[in-house]
Image (tube, rainbow, N blue to C red):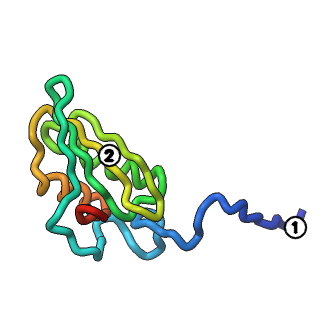
Amino acid sequence: MTGFQRIDLGLTDANAACSCCATGDSHGADSHGSSSSIATTPTRAEGALSAEFLVEGMTCSHCVSSVTEELSEVDGVQQVAVDLRPGAASVVTVTSSGPISDDAVRAAVEEAGYTLAAQGA
């Protein structure tokens, strides 16, 4: 054999790049401004608090891992669940033992290379 031909199966959008997959860009080099309004919906379940945040720029499982890892390092966070929505703001649910400040969540998300979406986005 002299080579092979690559066939695009159309399973991914080659034009959709996230901060972890984009060429020439790295985590933490996010150029998006942070929003002053965070989409959160706090709820209580069996002594724990749960809040939902909208995160922009996540397109793959590596994005999910990066955000989950950073948010898991925030004091009090017990669990992080992500509803990945490539091309739209993903829903990140943070369950904690007590209130977590929006600033701590924003800092963790930005450390992973992403941005919190404005409420209603």
Image x and y of residue 93, in percent: 29, 43
Asked where in the image residue 47 lies, by quadrant, the reply is: top left
**Image side of residue 35 versus residue 17, left or right:** left
Structural crowding at the residue carrying mark 2, measured as other residues with C-alpha within 10 Å and reported as few (<14), some (14–19) or many (≥20)? many
Give the position of the N terminus as an image quadrant.
bottom right
**Label 1: which residue?**
2
**Image side of residue 16 versus residue 119, left or right:** right
Q: Classify 61 as above or below 30.
A: above
Which amino acid, by three-letter code, is at mark 2? Thr
Residue at the outermost top position: 46
Image x and y of residue 21, in percent: 47, 65
**Label 2: which residue?**
68
Residue drawn where x is 26% and y is 57% of the image: 109
Q: Secondary structure at mark 2?
A: helix
Q: In 3D space, how far apart are the residues under numbered discs 2 and 1 (Cα atoms)?
A: 43 Å
Q: Classify 76 as above or below 12.
A: above
Image x and y of residue 54, in percent: 30, 56
Which amino acid, by three-letter code, is at mark 1? Thr
Residue drawn where x is 30% and y is 71% of the image: 30
